Amino acid sequence: MKKKALFIGGTGTISTAVVKRLVNELDWEVWVLNRGNRNSVLPERVNSIVCDVNDEKAVLDKIGDMTFDCVCEFIGFHVSQVERDYRIFKDKTKQYIYISSASAYHKPAAGYIITEGTSLANPYWQYSRDKIECEEFLMKKYKEEGFPVTIVRPSHTYDERHVPLGVHGKKGFWQVIKRMQEGKPVIIQGDGSSLWTLTWNGDFAIGYTGLMGNRHAIGEAFQITSDETLTWDQIYQTIADALGVKLNAYHVSTDFLRATGDKYGYDFTGSLLGDKSVSVVFDNSKLKRAVPDMATNVRFDMGVRIALDYVLSHPECQVEDPEFDEWCDRVIAAVEKAEESV
């Protein structure tokens, strides 16, 4: 008999890769519970439950007497949402996997090597604090009632539809790629030497699916990331190399980016100071003990070429952001003016 999984969400950057691996390679019976807006990205053999997960009665009516080997929560951002899940699924699943975030780790951490034992605290980003609160609720239910939770903490995961960056506008990555193509200077936070980890979603899916139905994962937290660590300068240079253009890197302090970005609604306090400006190297030993198949199969130089090939051949991914473009020019001009005045 096939194992059965229910995904809450299921069509995002991370969850899509997990669903595809389960259906195409591991032969699970997969159900997705969402509003049905993006289900076309999923394999044909996926079963769909079109419903607003916040409507608990409707969810229970749709599920009926079904039970699952694993319920996978990918869109739980606030504790009220995992409290809802607990009420719905506490007697309907053998395992509940919650997607938290590696940004929940203490900022700045006492050491740059991050393990699951690194303390959780992020004074700079509400998103991360909300994830911590969700983890605490779920682990309390595990300790007090045996609720079969597994916590997963991804870091910066990407797919063929996204090019990962440190600094970009509200409309995503494309305007930075366009600046590279046009030979314009591209803003990199800090001096570009801080360390960062980027994970291809297909590699993430290996780790995640290895935790599904794994008795050693119950009551535990796991980070799932690549083993490849790069500086931000190396990341941007790799993108420029894949585009076949010269990188004109322009380094701007995170504090200055925060001060200027706040005026335009760019949350660089959270996304940079609370995450990407801090050097991190992930120790995935715990995950590999539980999932021996976990490996980094797609290095960033490979993954970014896949992403750029896709983006450059799909005009719908090329969303221009003139406001961000103008902001970059103003920031660079302001920094140069300040340097000249000293």
Image (cartoon, rainbow, N blue to C red):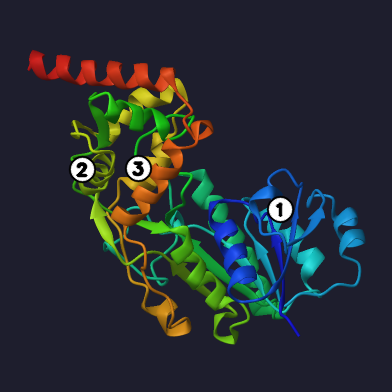
Quarter holding residue 1:
bottom right
> Are circles 1 and 3 on residues that touch, CB within 8 Å?
no
Q: How many marks?
A: 3
Quarter holding residue 279:
bottom left
- Note whether 280 is above or below 171 in the view shown: below
Answer yes or no: is residue 65 visible.
yes
Give the residue displayed 68% in from the left and 76% down from the top. Answer: 95
Point out which mark residue 192 bears: 2
**Number of the front mark, 2 or 1:** 2
Point out which mark residue 80 bears: 1
Give the residue displayed 44% in from the left and 66% down from the top. Answer: 203
Point out which mark residue 152 bears: none
Q: Position of residue 158 (x, y in %)?
A: 45, 51
For the C terminus, which image quadrant? top left
Q: Residues within 10 Å of mark 2 (few under 14, many from 20)?
A: many
Q: The disc labelled 3 sits on which kind of residue?
A: Leu
- 135 or 7: nearer the viewer: 7
- 127 or 74: nearer the viewer: 74
Q: Which residue is mark 3?
A: 273
Q: Earlier in the sequence, mark 3 or mark 2?
A: 2
Task: Describe the element under mark 3 as helix, strand or loop.
Answer: helix
> Are circles 3 and 2 on residues that touch, CB within 8 Å?
no
